[in-house]
């Protein structure tokens, strides 16, 4: 017996992206490769050597993240004091990523983390990422996440743009004056 409602077909479902298909496989392959490489190095030297390598990577990663975070905070506070936008191209984000990769146990992640600490590599990756983001934002369709990034103003639910400034002109400063009346539409 049918109720008249059509059953959803598989053609109605959007196709699965390549990233969603291959990312889990890539992560699994990376983990297997990391474990295999650790066992090879442990077999060639000793378990203590592998432990000391991993510990050194963790400590170096923590130092790099702390230093990059401090540099990013200084750039931000300097920009706020000057009233300008923070300087781009500082490489703090890539340095933090490199530090994080150093902190993750594994020799491949350590090698990639050390590679990200080299300034020419940071500059090349930064330019590539900037071009990619700009290209994606230009191709953004209405209603997508990229479109939301392009809009730099607040909208009311009816679609009208609300621009304004709040100015408090109360006698007596910021001292509490008692309960406020409820807000109405």
Image (cartoon, helix red, strand yellow):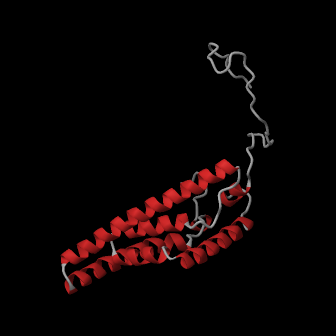
The x, y position of residue 42, in whole percent, is 22, 81
Instruction: Report whether 47 appears left or right of 90.
Output: left
Between 110 and 154, the one nearer to me in the picture: 110
The single residue placed furthest to the top in the displayed view is 178
Q: Is residue 27 visible?
A: yes
Residue at 80% x, 42% y: name it: 161
* Quadrant showing the C terminus: top right
Residue at image location 59% in from the left, 75% down from the top: 123
Q: Is residue 139 above or below residue 169?
A: below
Q: Position of residue 25 (x, y in %)?
A: 42, 75
Is any atom of residue 104 visible in this view? no
What residue occupies the far bottom of the structure in this picture?
44
Decide which of 72, 131 is in the foreground and name it.
72
Q: Does residue 122 sit above or below 77 in this rendering?
A: below
- On the image, the x and y values in percent for residue 48 come to 19, 75
In the rendered structure, the answer to whether residue 142 lies left or right of residue 43 reads right
Residue 15 is situated, as x and y percent measured from the top left of the image, at 59, 70
């Amino acid at each position: 017996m049918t109720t008249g409602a059509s059953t959803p077909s598989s053609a109605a479902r959007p196709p699965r992206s390549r990233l969603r298909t291959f990312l889990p496989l890539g992560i699994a392959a990376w983990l297997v490769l990391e474990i295999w490489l650790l066992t090879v190095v442990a077999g060639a030297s000793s378990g203590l050597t592998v432990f000391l390598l991993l510990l050194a990577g963790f400590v170096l990663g923590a130092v790099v993240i702390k230093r990059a975070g401090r540099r990013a905070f200084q750039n931000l506070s300097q920009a706020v004091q000057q009233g300008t936008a923070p300087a781009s191209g500082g490489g703090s984000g890539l340095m933090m990523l490199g530090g994080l990769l150093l902190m993750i146990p594994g020799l491949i992640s350590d090698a990639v983390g050390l590679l990200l600490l080299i300034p020419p590599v940071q500059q090349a990756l930064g330019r590539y990422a900037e071009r990619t983001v700009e290209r994606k934002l230009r191709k953004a369709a209405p209603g997508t996440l990229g479109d939301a990034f392009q809009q730099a103003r607040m909208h009311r639910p009816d679609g009208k743009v609300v621009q304004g400034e709040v100015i408090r002109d109360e006698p007596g400063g910021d001292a509490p004056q008692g309960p406020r009346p409820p807000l109405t539409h």
